[in-house]
Amino acid sequence: MTTSTIEPRTHSTLGDFVLTLSCADRPGIVHAVATFLMEQGGNIRESQQFGDQEHGRFFMRIDFETAQSTDAETLHAAFATVAGRFAMTYELWAARAPYRTLIL
């Protein structure tokens, strides 16, 4: 009988980022995004996606970490190739970056 165990992560996280995107819904989007993140040394921590069938749109939000030293601007520029293939609109930022909040 063979048993397997899940080994704990041995590397430290150097970056925590968020990627949001939308585009026309078609096959291959999730694969392309996940492949890009893997090539960048990324590990997906959280992911949500939604396909709007009425309007044919796909939406995705991914929180991911990297073990390689990088910054949001570098990742944003590198993602442009994937985004171009699917005519995506996207935003990518450091998860810890401050952002404007309006409280009413």
Image (cartoon, helix red, strand yellow):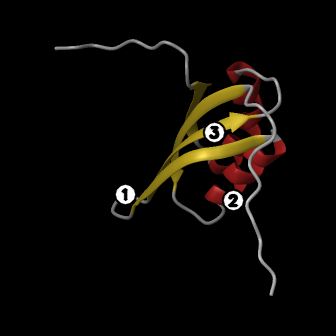
Q: Position of residue 24 (x, y in %)?
A: 52, 54
- Tell me which residue sits at (78%, 47%) in the image: 38
Tell me which label, 3 or 2, sits earlier in the chain.
2
What's under tag 2, amino acid-wise?
His
Residue 30 lies left or right of residue 61; in this view the side is right
Q: Position of residue 13 (x, y in %)?
A: 73, 30
Give how far apart the Cα atoms at labels 3 and 2 are: 15 Å
Total of numbered circles in the picture?
3
Which quadrant of the view contains residue 55?
bottom left
Under tag 1, what secondary structure?
A: loop
Mark 2 surroundings within 10 Å by alpha-carbon count, few (fewer than 14), some (14 through 19), many (20 or more): few
Q: Are marks 3 and 1 in contact (CB under 8 Å)?
A: no
Under tag 3, what secondary structure?
A: strand
Residue 93 lies left or right of residue 75; in this view the side is left
Is residue 11 depicted above or below 5 in this figure? Answer: above
- Tell me which residue sits at (70%, 26%) in the image: 15
- Tell me which residue sits at (56%, 25%) in the image: 95
Residue at mark 1: 55
Residue 82 lies left or right of residue 26; in this view the side is right
Residue at mark 2: 31
Is residue 61 depicted above or below 91 in this figure? Answer: below
Mark 1 surroundings within 10 Å by alpha-carbon count, few (fewer than 14), some (14 through 19), many (20 or more): few
Q: Position of residue 104 (x, y in %)?
A: 16, 14
Seen from the viewer's position, the closer of residues 55 and 43 is: 43
Tell me which label, 3 or 1, sits earlier in the chain.
1
What's under tag 1, amino acid-wise?
His
Give how far apart the Cα atoms at labels 2 and 1 are: 22 Å
